[in-house]
Image (cartoon, grey):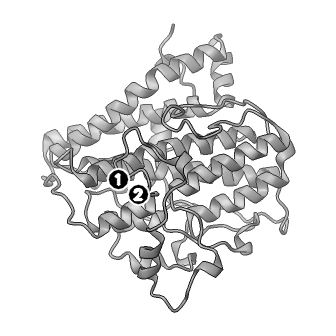
Amino acid sequence: MMSIKQFLGMRTQQELLTSHDIVHPKRILNKNLWTIEALREHLQWAVDVELYTIPYYMSAMYSVIDQASEARRLVRSVVNQEMLHMQCAANIANAYGVDLHITAPHYGKEVPHLDFTENPNQPTKVFSPYSTQIGPMDVERINTMCIIECPGEISPATLNPNSDEYGSIGEIYNAIRVGAAILRKHIIANNNQVAHFQSTYPEVSSLTVSKDGCEGLTQVNGLIDLIVDQGEGAAWPDEKINRDVPIEQRFEDDQKEQLSPEYQNHVDDIQPYWDHFQKFTYLRKQTLPATFPLNFGSPRGLQNQQILVSHFGHFLQLMNIVFNPIYQQQLAKENGISVEQVQHEAGAEFGTTMYKVGAAIAACWENGVVPVFSTSQSQTEQ
């Protein structure tokens, strides 16, 4: 069997590692009309957002010196679920025939496709100071995690394809839910569906879209429910929001609700009953653990940054193969091998490369430098 590196095609590490400023997407001109192009665009956005959270949360987690600390273990549980969420978002995207393109996130500016000032709960005012730069597990990073996972509100204004940005992750998925229902005839059953984590969530009916039509739509909605409920939790309906109650108290009240049993991880989650927003707002009230001190300019640290960039670049390549059936077919044709061979080779390297990424993040912190995930100038200056 040939190595993955021998048939990666045009999606090179350099291409995938070059992150860019957010380019606000063009507005869809069909007023209140979902097209398959609009839905596919939204599904690419969902994958972008899920990927964005993984290096950001992982970096904060690995910055903690005490591996057994509550904070590190709670964030690890969120990282694992974000990987599940990316898988689920990719499965939905593939069910609707999206040609997914997975590139390095750009940190330090806006979270892709989200404008938190549009969230009526105004998380950027409540959770401040905050920073979207990669950094240690400190007040700024925890506040940013709270902002990313903050619930939005159910609003008909967000349920059409004309929105350029959304106030919360939940609003993106609410819009996708509407578009997916209208365009359910486009669902392709069993189109490159990835089903890791099933043993961790045995009560979830399906982590894939294996049906088409109405049955497939039920599976799509189930995956959206899993992503949103584990993440920010269900959106707060208007009747639940008492405008006379300070927003901080609303967050406290929301923490009293438990995650649905089928979405709880009882394998390695020390708090399986809470969604991500609950975990992060809890950590915000605790004394944060000690993190590795920075020693900018350390030759060993700079070397570790380059190692991380290399491992992360290869991980991006593998994700493009694992989650994109169109790319799999292209690689198979160009190299005269079967799609099954491409899938096997990529799958065999996926877990090992993910482990290497984690080890490289840890090595950066241990050698006094901030982890780096792209070749953009703003990232290399960290």
Q: Quick one: quadrant of the C terminus?
A: bottom left
SS for tag 1? helix
Q: Position of residue 124 (x, y in %)?
A: 43, 76
4 and 150: which one is in front?
Answer: 150
Q: Which mark is residue 107?
A: 2
Closer-to-camera residue (332/126): 126
Task: Give the image location of residue 280, x and y in percent.
Answer: 37, 62
Whether pointer 1 and pointer 2 mark residues with C-beta atoms closer than 8 Å, the reply is yes
- What's the residue type where badge 2 is placed? Tyr
Number of the front mark, 1 or 2: 2
Q: Amino acid at mark 1?
A: Gln
Is residue 284 visible in the rendered image? The answer is yes
Where is residue 126 drawn, in percent x and y? Answer: 40, 79
Identify which residue is drawn at 24% across, 41% down: 362
Tell me the tag on residue 306.
Answer: none
Q: Mark 1 sits on what residue?
A: 379
Q: Is residue 13 left or right of residue 167?
A: left
Q: Residue 222, how many percent across, how many down?
A: 67, 47
Say whether disc 1 or disc 2 marks the residue closer to the N-terminus. 2
The answer to whether 339 is drawn above or below residue 71 in the figure is: above
Write the residue at 60% across / 34% down.
323
Residue farthest along the bottom direction in this orientation: 244
Compared with 16, 162 (above or below) is below
Residue 110 visible in the displayed image: no
What kind of element bears circle 2?
loop
